[in-house]
Every structure is written in structure tokens, then in C-alpha cells.
Amino acid sequence: MRYGVRTPLRTTGLVVLLGVVMTMLDTTIVNVALGTLARDFHTTLATMQWAVTGYLLALSMTVPITGWAVGRFGSRNVWLVSLVLFVAGSALSATAWSVMSLVAFRAMQGLGGGLLLPVGQMMLAQAAGKERMGRAMAALSVPSMLVPVLGPPLGGVIVQGLGWRWLFLINVPVCAIALLAAFVLLPREPGANPRGLDVLGMAMLSPGLAALVYGLSEIGNGASLLHPALWLGVALVVAFAVRALRRTGTLLDLRLFGNRMFASAVTALVCYSAAMFGFTVLVPLYSQLAQGGTPLDAGLLMAPMGIGAAITMPIAGKLADARGPRGVGAAGVLLAVAGIAGFAAFGGVVPMFVLGLGHGLVSTSVMAAAFKTLEPVAIPGATTLSTIAVRLASPFGVAVLAVLLQVFTRTGVERPFVYAFGVAIALAAVSLVPIALIGSKAWRGSSSAPA
């Protein structure tokens, strides 16, 4: 939207939620159908896993162009095109006749879905303004926490009742409503910064991010730390960063990290996200391998976390707007650490609920802090940077904890899961340091970098 002109926050929130809810659901809903898909397509489970991997890699590759696309074409146009790509990929995935066709159509879904979340976050931040940033981030954080958790059980119901093709067809009516809402409710506006595309930067960063995500995912699945995709990704991303710091007009403006509140908030999100995503992957393994539970038992363990987060996220948004995010975020981290420690010691749903309460406080308040002191023109680039950082932190956390779990198990350490949970606690606790650096004075109206 044109900088300086706001669409009402509730209107923007409705449009964004309709658009992103299905993309969030699609990150997990297909997981439960992999066995069925492998059987129907007469292939192995490892090959079928590319239906998930291809979607996630496409998500990662499109994020870097978000800021440029919005500046060039306007947020409304990018939003509409992204929705069309996502719904087209969904409809085509439902007609897939082979593994390769399904992987290709899932990648099309990912190309659209990769733009929807950062563009939606961008539109919410611009509609909210500095005084309502916490509530705006809460509007996006609640579904981002609940929807992926609901994906596996919903996917199981659909596969058993209607068949796997309906995992994709269910997106069509929801996205049609989202398209109509966006077309009617979002104002037409030109791009605010119609600069040229940094083609060389895109050629380095997009494949670099995809290689990094893939390499980290493979390491999390047991591959060597010398996996070539990981180090190719590192080389490409580092080369992009060196080039971006030496010149202007590149795909991403890394100088935004010169704003202390933005840099502190993103660093906190990276540390915290690595811990949380790693932990949520360990929980199902712990339930099934250490406690002898079923996949359903593992899924039900995650439900209290989602419920707890849904309770505190709206509260966190209001508290962050009124009092600043530092205290809210720190309290959330302490609750999350207590929840992980309680689960490691005693197991059960109560510690997961406590963890969820803390998660709701952290994710909403710290994300609001990331955008608070930025001028509206900087929000597209900042949204892209923060999205990339969290996208990389998630598989990194999974890889670190998975590797450590394997090491602890091979070396005969008693109760290896407990030690892995301890590492998750340490990663989460580290986020308290950058949270402490988030300024509180700047929260009450200054648009400059906090002191």
C-alpha cells in the first residue's frame, strides 16, 4: 500500500488471515499422507518426501524478492498474484499423476506461498502504524502458531475420509474467498519504489537460501555435516552479504541492521526460533521412542502448546503496545524455558501448556519490536530480512538438536533426550541477551533508532 496511507487494521487483518491460513496449513498437512502417496505412486517414502521438501524450498527461494516486488508493483498486486499462484498450484497438485508432477505443482504452491506471509506481515505493519504494532503482529501470530499444529490431525481426517487429493482441493474455495476479499477491500496503489531488480543478487541469494535450507534439513535427517548443499548455500549467502554491504541498490538492504531495535529483535527471534523448532521436532520422537507412544499421542502432546500460545498472543500484543516489548518478551522466554525444563523432567501436557503461554508472549512482542522504529518505506525490506532469518533459524535448530541427539545416543549417554532438551533451553535462554538490548524509551513515540 502507498506509504503514508493506511487501510483500516481490521480490514487488512481479515484479508491477510484469509490469504495466509492455507499456506501455513500446507507446511504440515501433507506430512500424514506421505505413506499413502508413496503407495499410490508406487515409489519410496524417501522419494515422496520431495513433495514436502520441494514446497519448502520454493517458499525459501521467493522470499528475497518480496521487498523489490512490493516496491515495483505494489503490495496489492503482489498479494493477488501470489494467491493465484498458490491456488493454481493447489488445484494442479490435486490432479497429479506422478511423483514428479506432484513435486512440480507443490513447488508452484511454494512460489506463491513464499510471498504471502512476508507481504501479509508488511501490509499489517503498515496498516497498524507504530502505536498498534503489537496487536497487528498478534493477529498474524495466533494462526501461525495454531494452524501448523492442526495440520497433521486435519490431514489424517481428510485422507481417511475423502482421499489425498482433497488435501489440495480444500485450498481452492478458501483461496477464492481470499482473492475476492483482497480484490474488493485492498486499495489500488502503484509501487512506491520502482527500482530495477538486482538480478545478480537474486542469482546468489535465492539458490543460496534453498541450498542452506535443504542442507540443514538433510543434516537433521542424519546426513554428514559436510553435506555439499549446506556449504554451497553458505558460500552463496556470504558472497551476497559481502556484495550487499559494498554497494547500494542490492536485493536486500543489510544496513537495516544498523537500527539497534530491529537488529536486537531479529537476533532474538533467530535464537528463540532455533530452540522452539528444534524442540517441537524432538517432542514427537521422544513420545514415540522413549515413551512408546503412538503418532496420535505425539500429535496430542503439541495441542496444549498451541492452546497456551493462543491465550497469550492477543494479550502480548496489547501489553507490547502499552508498555513496550522488552519485559513481555523476557517473561515469555522464562516461561518457555520453564516449560521445556518441566517437560524434560516430568513429561506431560502441563509443561507444554506453560511453554505455549511463553511462546505467545515472545513471538508477538519481539516481532512488533522489529518494526517499531523503522520508517514505513523501510518495512518491505525489513519484513524480507526478518522472514529470511527465521526461515533459516528453524532448520538450523532442528539440525543442531537432531545431530546432538544422535551423538548422545551413539556415545551411550543415559537419557539422551534430556541432554538435547537442555541444549534447547540454552538456545532459548540466549535470546534474553538481545531482548535486553531492545530499547524501551523508543517505544513511546520516537521513530529514530533507540538509545
Image (tube, rainbow, N blue to C red):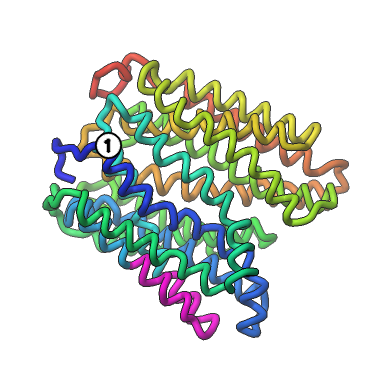
Give the quarter of the image for residue 199: bottom left
Q: Is residue 295 left or right of residue 415?
A: left
Q: Where's residue 446, x and y in %?
A: 24, 19
Q: Is residue 415 left or right of residue 95?
A: right
Q: Is residue 400 left or right of residue 386?
A: right
Identify the image quadrant of the N terminus.
top left
Instruction: Tell me the residue at 67%/78% (across/down).
Output: 44
The magenta span reads: 85-107
The image shows residue 445, relative to residue 128, as above or below, that is above
Main SS category, magenta section: helix
What SS does tag 1 mark?
A: helix
User: Which residue is more in the foreground, 99 or 419?
Assistant: 99
Instruction: Tell me the residue at 51%/49% (across/down).
Output: 147
Amino acid on which disc 1 is placed? Leu
User: Which residue is more in the foreground, 412 or 243?
Assistant: 412
Give the quarter of the image for residue 265: top left
Instruction: Tell me the residue at 27%/54% (across/down).
Output: 181
Q: Where's residue 216, x and y in %?
A: 57, 56
Residue at the extreme front of the image, as rendered: 161
Residue 91: in magenta span: yes
- The residue wearing badge 1 is 9
Q: Is residue 348 left or right of residue 189?
A: right
Residue 108 at least partly seen = yes
Instruction: Tell me the residue at 22%/32% (across/down).
Output: 375
